[in-house]
Amino acid sequence: MRKIPDRNIEAAKAAHVQAVRNYVQTKGECYQRDLFEAVTAVCPVRYDFAEACRRDDWSWLERFLLADVPTLRRLTQEKTEALQFEQFLKLYQNRFCHGADTYVDASTCYNSYSLIQNLGVTVCPYCDEEYLHVLKSRDQKTVRTLELDHFFPKKKYPALAMCFYNLVPSGQACNGIKLEESLGMSPFEPEIESCTRLCPDLPMGVNMEAVPVEECVIHFHPGGAMGENVKTLRLEERYLRHRAQAHRYLVLRQNFDETKLQELVRLGIFPSLEQAREVLYEENAASADQPLLQKLKHDILEF
Ligand SMILES: [Zn+2]
Protein backbone atom coordinates (compact mmCIF):
# COMPACT_ATOMS: atom_id res chain seq x y z
CA MET A 1 0.00 0.00 0.00
CA ARG A 2 2.69 2.35 -1.06
CA LYS A 3 2.36 4.63 -4.04
CA ILE A 4 5.02 4.10 -6.72
CA PRO A 5 7.04 7.34 -6.56
CA ASP A 6 5.96 9.93 -9.13
CA ARG A 7 9.42 11.37 -9.58
CA ASN A 8 10.58 8.55 -11.90
CA ILE A 9 7.38 7.70 -13.71
CA GLU A 10 7.58 10.06 -16.71
CA ALA A 11 11.09 8.97 -17.68
CA ALA A 12 10.20 5.31 -17.15
CA LYS A 13 7.13 5.70 -19.38
CA ALA A 14 9.12 7.36 -22.15
CA ALA A 15 11.77 4.61 -22.14
CA HIS A 16 9.11 1.89 -22.13
CA VAL A 17 7.13 3.28 -25.04
CA GLN A 18 10.22 4.03 -27.08
CA ALA A 19 11.55 0.48 -26.67
CA VAL A 20 8.25 -1.20 -27.59
CA ARG A 21 7.85 1.09 -30.57
CA ASN A 22 11.41 0.31 -31.73
CA TYR A 23 10.60 -3.38 -31.45
CA VAL A 24 7.37 -3.09 -33.44
CA GLN A 25 9.22 -1.10 -36.11
CA THR A 26 11.62 -4.02 -36.62
CA LYS A 27 8.68 -6.27 -37.49
CA GLY A 28 7.17 -6.65 -40.95
CA GLU A 29 4.18 -4.76 -42.30
CA CYS A 30 1.90 -7.74 -41.74
CA TYR A 31 2.70 -7.84 -37.98
CA GLN A 32 2.29 -4.08 -37.68
CA ARG A 33 -1.04 -4.12 -39.51
CA ASP A 34 -2.42 -6.95 -37.34
CA LEU A 35 -1.28 -5.17 -34.20
CA PHE A 36 -2.82 -1.89 -35.38
CA GLU A 37 -6.15 -3.60 -36.03
CA ALA A 38 -6.10 -5.36 -32.65
CA VAL A 39 -5.10 -2.28 -30.65
CA THR A 40 -7.53 0.07 -32.37
CA ALA A 41 -10.37 -2.41 -31.81
CA VAL A 42 -9.76 -1.70 -28.11
CA CYS A 43 -8.82 2.00 -28.35
CA PRO A 44 -10.39 3.31 -31.57
CA VAL A 45 -8.74 6.00 -33.72
CA ARG A 46 -10.07 8.09 -36.62
CA TYR A 47 -7.46 6.95 -39.16
CA ASP A 48 -6.52 3.66 -40.78
CA PHE A 49 -3.25 1.75 -40.91
CA ALA A 50 -2.19 3.17 -44.30
CA GLU A 51 -2.63 6.72 -43.03
CA ALA A 52 -0.75 5.96 -39.78
CA CYS A 53 2.15 4.61 -41.86
CA ARG A 54 2.12 7.58 -44.22
CA ARG A 55 2.26 10.02 -41.32
CA ASP A 56 4.67 7.82 -39.33
CA ASP A 57 2.10 8.17 -36.55
CA TRP A 58 2.56 5.80 -33.60
CA SER A 59 0.17 7.50 -31.22
CA TRP A 60 -2.27 4.52 -31.48
CA LEU A 61 0.42 2.30 -29.95
CA GLU A 62 1.61 4.80 -27.37
CA ARG A 63 -1.86 5.63 -26.17
CA PHE A 64 -2.61 1.96 -25.58
CA LEU A 65 0.70 1.21 -23.83
CA LEU A 66 0.27 4.21 -21.54
CA ALA A 67 -3.43 3.83 -20.71
CA ASP A 68 -3.85 4.73 -17.04
CA VAL A 69 -5.27 2.43 -14.37
CA PRO A 70 -8.91 3.68 -14.57
CA THR A 71 -8.82 3.26 -18.37
CA LEU A 72 -7.37 -0.25 -18.08
CA ARG A 73 -10.03 -1.10 -15.51
CA ARG A 74 -12.74 0.13 -17.85
CA LEU A 75 -11.28 -1.85 -20.77
CA THR A 76 -11.21 -5.06 -18.73
CA GLN A 77 -14.88 -4.56 -17.96
CA GLU A 78 -16.06 -3.50 -21.41
CA LYS A 79 -13.66 -5.07 -23.91
CA THR A 80 -12.67 -8.44 -22.49
CA GLU A 81 -12.95 -10.20 -25.85
CA ALA A 82 -10.95 -7.60 -27.72
CA LEU A 83 -8.16 -7.94 -25.12
CA GLN A 84 -7.33 -11.51 -26.13
CA PHE A 85 -4.71 -10.77 -28.82
CA GLU A 86 -1.31 -12.14 -27.88
CA GLN A 87 1.40 -10.05 -29.53
CA PHE A 88 2.20 -8.17 -26.30
CA LEU A 89 2.07 -11.32 -24.19
CA LYS A 90 4.65 -12.93 -26.48
CA LEU A 91 6.81 -9.83 -26.36
CA TYR A 92 6.59 -9.91 -22.57
CA GLN A 93 7.52 -13.60 -22.34
CA ASN A 94 10.13 -13.81 -25.10
CA ARG A 95 11.97 -10.54 -24.66
CA PHE A 96 10.87 -8.36 -21.77
CA CYS A 97 11.06 -10.95 -19.00
CA HIS A 98 13.25 -13.55 -20.60
CA GLY A 99 16.32 -12.86 -18.45
CA ALA A 100 18.75 -10.01 -18.01
CA ASP A 101 20.41 -10.50 -21.42
CA THR A 102 17.37 -10.52 -23.68
CA TYR A 103 15.96 -7.20 -24.75
CA VAL A 104 12.80 -5.69 -26.16
CA ASP A 105 15.07 -3.18 -27.84
CA ALA A 106 18.74 -4.12 -28.22
CA SER A 107 19.78 -0.56 -29.09
CA THR A 108 18.81 0.66 -25.59
CA CYS A 109 19.20 -2.73 -23.81
CA TYR A 110 15.64 -2.36 -22.61
CA ASN A 111 13.89 -5.14 -20.71
CA SER A 112 12.16 -5.73 -17.37
CA TYR A 113 15.33 -4.92 -15.44
CA SER A 114 15.43 -1.48 -17.08
CA LEU A 115 11.84 -0.79 -16.08
CA ILE A 116 12.51 -1.83 -12.48
CA GLN A 117 15.57 0.38 -12.30
CA ASN A 118 13.88 3.29 -14.05
CA LEU A 119 11.01 3.22 -11.55
CA GLY A 120 13.44 3.13 -8.62
CA VAL A 121 11.13 0.96 -6.52
CA THR A 122 13.12 -0.92 -3.87
CA VAL A 123 10.33 -1.93 -1.49
CA CYS A 124 7.27 -3.97 -2.49
CA PRO A 125 4.45 -1.43 -2.91
CA TYR A 126 1.76 -4.01 -2.16
CA CYS A 127 2.94 -4.96 1.33
CA ASP A 128 5.72 -2.53 2.34
CA GLU A 129 7.49 -5.42 4.07
CA GLU A 130 9.72 -6.94 1.36
CA TYR A 131 12.87 -5.49 -0.19
CA LEU A 132 13.20 -5.77 -3.96
CA HIS A 133 16.75 -6.50 -5.09
CA VAL A 134 18.51 -6.48 -8.44
CA LEU A 135 21.85 -8.19 -7.78
CA LYS A 136 24.83 -9.80 -9.44
CA SER A 137 25.03 -13.53 -8.87
CA ARG A 138 28.38 -15.30 -8.31
CA ASP A 139 28.86 -15.86 -12.02
CA GLN A 140 28.13 -12.15 -12.59
CA LYS A 141 24.68 -12.75 -14.01
CA THR A 142 22.06 -10.17 -13.09
CA VAL A 143 19.37 -11.65 -10.88
CA ARG A 144 16.37 -10.15 -9.14
CA THR A 145 14.29 -10.95 -6.10
CA LEU A 146 11.14 -9.38 -7.46
CA GLU A 147 8.48 -10.05 -10.00
CA LEU A 148 6.57 -7.80 -12.30
CA ASP A 149 3.01 -8.35 -11.31
CA HIS A 150 0.31 -7.86 -13.90
CA PHE A 151 -2.25 -5.92 -11.91
CA PHE A 152 -4.85 -7.05 -14.46
CA PRO A 153 -3.80 -10.70 -14.89
CA LYS A 154 -2.06 -11.50 -18.17
CA LYS A 155 -3.79 -14.88 -18.52
CA LYS A 156 -7.15 -13.18 -18.52
CA TYR A 157 -6.08 -10.10 -20.49
CA PRO A 158 -3.02 -11.04 -22.61
CA ALA A 159 -3.25 -7.79 -24.58
CA LEU A 160 -2.39 -5.81 -21.42
CA ALA A 161 0.86 -7.70 -20.80
CA MET A 162 3.07 -4.76 -21.84
CA CYS A 163 0.88 -1.85 -20.72
CA PHE A 164 3.03 0.36 -18.50
CA TYR A 165 0.44 0.86 -15.75
CA ASN A 166 -0.24 -2.86 -15.63
CA LEU A 167 3.36 -3.68 -14.65
CA VAL A 168 3.83 -3.44 -10.90
CA PRO A 169 7.21 -4.35 -9.39
CA SER A 170 6.37 -6.54 -6.45
CA GLY A 171 7.99 -8.95 -4.02
CA GLN A 172 7.92 -12.68 -4.50
CA ALA A 173 5.65 -13.16 -1.48
CA CYS A 174 2.95 -10.82 -2.82
CA ASN A 175 3.23 -12.12 -6.36
CA GLY A 176 3.14 -15.72 -5.15
CA ILE A 177 0.00 -15.09 -3.12
CA LYS A 178 -1.79 -12.97 -5.70
CA LEU A 179 -1.15 -15.18 -8.76
CA GLU A 180 -4.04 -14.60 -11.16
CA GLU A 181 -6.37 -13.02 -8.61
CA SER A 182 -7.46 -9.42 -9.01
CA LEU A 183 -6.84 -6.65 -6.50
CA GLY A 184 -8.87 -3.54 -5.82
CA MET A 185 -6.21 -0.81 -5.98
CA SER A 186 -2.99 -0.41 -7.90
CA PRO A 187 0.17 1.12 -6.41
CA PHE A 188 0.08 3.53 -9.36
CA GLU A 189 -3.16 5.02 -8.03
CA PRO A 190 -2.62 8.08 -5.81
CA GLU A 191 -5.29 7.03 -3.30
CA ILE A 192 -3.59 3.77 -2.41
CA GLU A 193 -1.87 5.21 0.66
CA SER A 194 -4.84 7.11 2.04
CA CYS A 195 -7.17 4.11 1.78
CA THR A 196 -5.64 2.31 4.74
CA ARG A 197 -4.67 3.40 8.25
CA LEU A 198 -2.43 0.87 9.92
CA CYS A 199 -2.85 0.78 13.67
CA PRO A 200 -3.68 -1.69 16.43
CA ASP A 201 -7.13 -1.20 17.98
CA LEU A 202 -6.29 -0.34 21.58
CA PRO A 203 -8.36 1.59 24.13
CA MET A 204 -7.85 5.38 24.10
CA GLY A 205 -5.30 6.58 26.62
CA VAL A 206 -4.00 3.11 27.49
CA ASN A 207 -0.49 3.07 28.94
CA MET A 208 1.57 1.39 26.26
CA GLU A 209 4.25 0.27 28.70
CA ALA A 210 1.59 -2.03 30.24
CA VAL A 211 0.34 -3.45 26.92
CA PRO A 212 2.00 -6.75 25.93
CA VAL A 213 3.48 -6.86 22.42
CA GLU A 214 1.16 -9.75 21.46
CA GLU A 215 -1.82 -7.44 21.88
CA CYS A 216 -0.52 -4.99 19.29
CA VAL A 217 -2.31 -6.72 16.42
CA ILE A 218 -2.15 -4.39 13.43
CA HIS A 219 -5.38 -3.68 11.60
CA PHE A 220 -5.42 -2.02 8.22
CA HIS A 221 -8.82 -0.31 8.40
CA PRO A 222 -9.12 -0.40 4.61
CA GLY A 223 -11.42 1.94 2.75
CA GLY A 224 -13.02 1.37 -0.67
CA ALA A 225 -11.38 -1.15 -2.94
CA MET A 226 -8.36 -1.54 -0.65
CA GLY A 227 -10.28 -4.18 1.31
CA GLU A 228 -9.67 -6.53 -1.59
CA ASN A 229 -5.88 -5.96 -1.46
CA VAL A 230 -5.76 -6.54 2.29
CA LYS A 231 -7.79 -9.72 2.00
CA THR A 232 -6.19 -11.21 -1.11
CA LEU A 233 -2.60 -10.49 -0.03
CA ARG A 234 -3.33 -11.68 3.56
CA LEU A 235 -1.79 -8.47 4.83
CA GLU A 236 -3.18 -8.52 8.37
CA GLU A 237 -1.99 -12.10 8.82
CA ARG A 238 1.46 -11.23 7.50
CA TYR A 239 1.66 -8.15 9.72
CA LEU A 240 1.22 -10.27 12.85
CA ARG A 241 5.00 -10.57 12.83
CA HIS A 242 5.33 -6.78 13.03
CA ARG A 243 3.57 -6.43 16.38
CA ALA A 244 6.83 -5.59 18.18
CA GLN A 245 7.51 -2.78 15.71
CA ALA A 246 4.00 -1.40 16.13
CA HIS A 247 4.44 -1.55 19.90
CA ARG A 248 7.71 0.35 19.64
CA TYR A 249 6.07 3.11 17.57
CA LEU A 250 3.15 3.34 19.99
CA VAL A 251 5.52 3.76 22.95
CA LEU A 252 7.38 6.39 20.96
CA ARG A 253 4.14 8.23 20.22
CA GLN A 254 3.19 8.10 23.89
CA ASN A 255 6.53 9.57 24.95
CA PHE A 256 7.09 11.98 22.07
CA ASP A 257 3.88 13.00 20.35
CA GLU A 258 3.65 16.11 18.18
CA THR A 259 3.00 18.41 21.18
CA LYS A 260 6.03 17.08 23.00
CA LEU A 261 8.21 17.47 19.93
CA GLN A 262 7.08 21.10 19.61
CA GLU A 263 7.93 21.62 23.27
CA LEU A 264 11.42 20.22 22.73
CA VAL A 265 11.91 22.59 19.81
CA ARG A 266 10.61 25.53 21.89
CA LEU A 267 13.10 24.65 24.65
CA GLY A 268 15.91 24.71 22.08
CA ILE A 269 16.75 21.01 22.48
CA PHE A 270 16.18 20.54 18.75
CA PRO A 271 16.47 23.32 16.16
CA SER A 272 13.40 22.13 14.21
CA LEU A 273 10.57 19.60 14.19
CA GLU A 274 12.27 17.77 11.30
CA GLN A 275 15.44 17.37 13.32
CA ALA A 276 13.50 16.20 16.37
CA ARG A 277 11.84 13.54 14.22
CA GLU A 278 15.12 12.62 12.62
CA VAL A 279 16.66 11.84 16.01
CA LEU A 280 13.69 10.48 17.95
CA TYR A 281 11.77 8.74 15.15
CA GLU A 282 14.89 7.82 13.16
CA GLU A 283 13.25 9.56 10.24
CA ASN A 284 15.31 10.82 7.35
CA ALA A 285 13.13 12.04 4.52
CA ALA A 286 16.13 13.02 2.40
CA SER A 287 17.65 9.54 2.48
CA ALA A 288 17.64 7.62 -0.79
CA ASP A 289 17.08 4.38 1.11
CA GLN A 290 13.48 3.41 1.51
CA PRO A 291 13.11 1.52 4.79
CA LEU A 292 10.43 -1.13 5.20
CA LEU A 293 7.16 -0.51 7.07
CA GLN A 294 7.16 3.25 6.45
CA LYS A 295 3.39 3.30 6.15
CA LEU A 296 3.00 1.64 9.57
CA LYS A 297 5.40 4.11 11.10
CA HIS A 298 3.78 7.19 9.57
CA ASP A 299 0.27 6.04 10.43
CA ILE A 300 1.09 5.37 14.08
CA LEU A 301 3.29 8.39 14.60
CA GLU A 302 0.85 10.52 12.61
CA PHE A 303 3.16 12.58 10.41
ZN1 LIG B 1 4.98 -7.56 -1.09
Image (cartoon, rainbow, N blue to C red):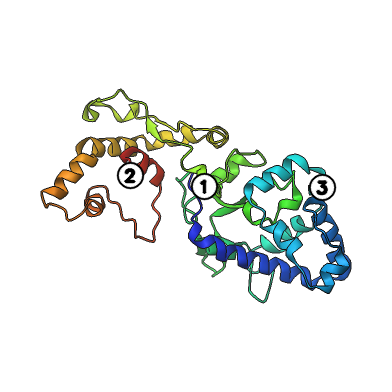
Per the model, the C-alpha gap separating discs 2 and 1 is 18 Å
Which SS class for mark 2? loop
Residue in the picture at 30% in, 35% down: 247
Mark 3 vs 2: CB contact within 8 A: no
Vertical order, 44 against 128 (above or below): below
Q: Residues within 10 Å of mark 3 (few under 14, many from 20)?
A: some
Q: Could you say whether the residue bearing mark 3 is in a helix, strand or loop?
A: helix
Mark 1 Cα within 10 Å, few/some/many (few <14, many 20+)? some
Count of marks, rendered view: 3
Q: Observer-nearest residue: 220 or 271?
A: 271
> What amino acid is found at the position of numbered circle 3 in the picture?
Ala
Rendered view: 297 above or below 19: above
Give left or right: position of 3 versus 163: left
- Per the image, the residue denoted by label 2 is 303
For the residues labelled 2 and 1, say whether their Cβ atoms are less than 8 Å apart: no
Residue found at x 84% / y 62%: 47
Tell me which amino acid carries mark 2.
Phe
Say the numbered circle drawn on residue 190.
1
Q: Kindly identify which residue carries mark 3.
A: 82
Q: Quadrant of residue 54?
A: bottom right
In the picture as drawn, the residue positioned furthest to the top comes out as 203
Q: Secondary structure at mark 1?
A: helix
Q: Residue at x 83, y 55 (%)?
A: 38
Single out the residue that lies furthest toward the front: 46
Q: Quadrant of the C terminus?
A: top left
Q: Position of residue 71 (x, y in %)?
A: 68, 47
